[in-house]
Structure formats: structure tokens, C-alpha cells
Amino acid sequence: LAQLRSALDAECGEAWTAPHRRAPHVAIDIRPESASLLPPAPAPEVEPPKASYLSRLKKKALYLESRDGAVALLQARARGRRARKQKRRGAGEEAEEGVEASTACFPTPVDCRPRPTARSLLLGCLLCVPLLLLSPLLLLCLAACYAYLRLPYLLGWVTSKAITRLGLFGYPLTFGAIHLSPWLELRPARLRLRLYVEDFSLSNPPSLGCPHRHFVSAGALDFLLTIDLRWLRELLRTGRLQPVPVHFEQTRVQRVKLFFELYQGQLNINALTREIAEREVRAALASRARSCCRRQP
């Protein structure tokens, strides 16, 4: 630079002293000593990322955040369980090795049921006091509800026992359930009755031992009866019992099964009638014998 400055000064002096002379051209070539002084190359153009790529990155970030939070929560629960276990065992006892916090990242079932507290126990005791005071009435109401719901089966059992002992002299006949729906008409005076019977059956003769248990059975019997009540007027007026007219207005039988069987050389219907007759004769003889024994002194 000093040499260049001196050369420029000499040229300028000559030009000042001899203005008619043209100043020579001075070419200055300044080259950098290293390539680091070169200007940076322009950056290549990069296309902006697509919306689908950005959405995938966002979902992945949210998933990582949620997973990290879940892992931290599970690890905290594991540490809490281990601390409570050690506290229950007390000081001086050797605590068992619990689940490692690093392995607590797997989901475990969480008991979300409310734990009993002193307040809930006190509230339960307060609610039990009136129940204990009203226990007789409550038990009576429950018994009445149960009896009402089981009334059709109770009627069927009572009717089966009554007909078997009084009408058939011990020959088995059963009713599963009897549903009654009565209503009264005043003009004319008559009682209408809807009778629905379930699981009716008349057994085969027990002495014959047939393969089938029942001689006849029906899944359901539906009757609509009408009873004329004018006989009550005659009974109150004259004191004599008149015939009671009963009209079967509707009869419906469903799922009927009838078995005629020839077993041990006997037809089951013949054995049935014979056994009912024998039972009737035995019952009559037994009643006459009892009456005779009572008359003797």
C-alpha cells in the first residue's frame, strides 16, 4: 500500500506540473489471500412443508406429551402404593420389593369405587335406625307383596289339594296357577268370572305304572263364566236353595296332550276309571265304619 501511495503521488505530481500530458492508466488488481473472504453462495430454494406433514408432526408431539404425562402419573401411583405399603408394615419390618417405577408404564386397573368414610358410615347408621323401628310393618308389607304376587300359584295348590282329596278321593290332579278376574253386573244381577288355569294335568293310574306320567295335560285353560244371582233372592225369601245356573260363555284350551296307552295288558283309561271307583268305594266304607264305631256305646 505504501508503494502504491508513492506511485500515485508521483503520477499526480507529474500531471500537476505537465497538464498537457495524459495520465497513464493504473490498473489495481486486489485479490484475497484466502477463499474465506469470498461472498457466500446463495442458499438453494426450499419448498415449504406440506400441511399433511405438519399435522403428522403435531399429532406425534401431542402423543409424546400425553405418553410422557401418563407414564409420569403411573410412576407416581406406583411410588405412592409402595410408600403406603411400607407405612402399613411399620418401622423395623423389612418392606417388600414393589413394582419398579420404570415398569409402571403399563396400564393397570384403577378402582374408582368410593371408599367408605366416617361420614358415609354415620349416614348409613342413621338410615338404618328408622328401618329398625319400622321393621315389623316393613316385613308385613313385604310379606303381603310376596303373597299377592304368588296368589295364583297358591290358589292352584289349594284347588289341587281340595279336588284331589274331596272330589277324586286321592287320585292326583294338579293345577299350576289359577288367575281369577271377577266383576259384577247389577241389571241383570249376575257375576261374571274370567278363569285362566296354567299347567293342568290328570295323572295316569299310579298302580299301573305307565311310561307317561299324565293321562291328559294342558298348558292353559281359559274360561269365561256367568253365574246368575237370582237364586240368592229365592234363598232369602223362601229359605230354599235353588239350582245355581252357570253359563260357560267361552272355553279355550291350549297345548293339549292326551295319551292312550296299553300297558301290562290294560288300557290306561280303563284303569283310571276303575281306580277312581275303587277309591270312592273305600272312602265310603271307611266313613260308614267310622259312623258305626261312633254309634256303639
Image (cartoon, grey):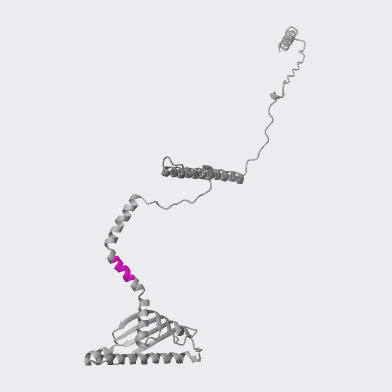
Residue 272 against residue 51 in the figure, above or below: below
Residue placed most toward the observer, 1 or 143: 143
Is residue 140 shown in magenta? yes
How far across and how far down the image is residue 102, in percent?
A: 53, 42
In this view, which residue lies farthest toward the front?
297
How far across and how far down the image is residue 136, in percent?
A: 28, 66
Left/right placement of residue 207 relative to residue 3 reads left
Left/right placement of residue 87 relative to residue 31 reads left
Residue 39 against residue 247 in the figure, above or below: above
Is residue 125 shown in magenta? no
How far across and how far down the image is residue 269, in percent?
A: 46, 90
Q: Point out the image quarter for the C terminus.
A: bottom left
Give me the residue at 28% from left, 58% from top: 129
Segment tinted magenta in the rendering = 137-145
Give me the residue at 28% from left, 66% from top: 137
Residue placed most toward the observer, 15 or 29: 29
Q: Main secondary structure of the magenta part?
A: helix
Q: Which image quarter: residue 189?
A: bottom left
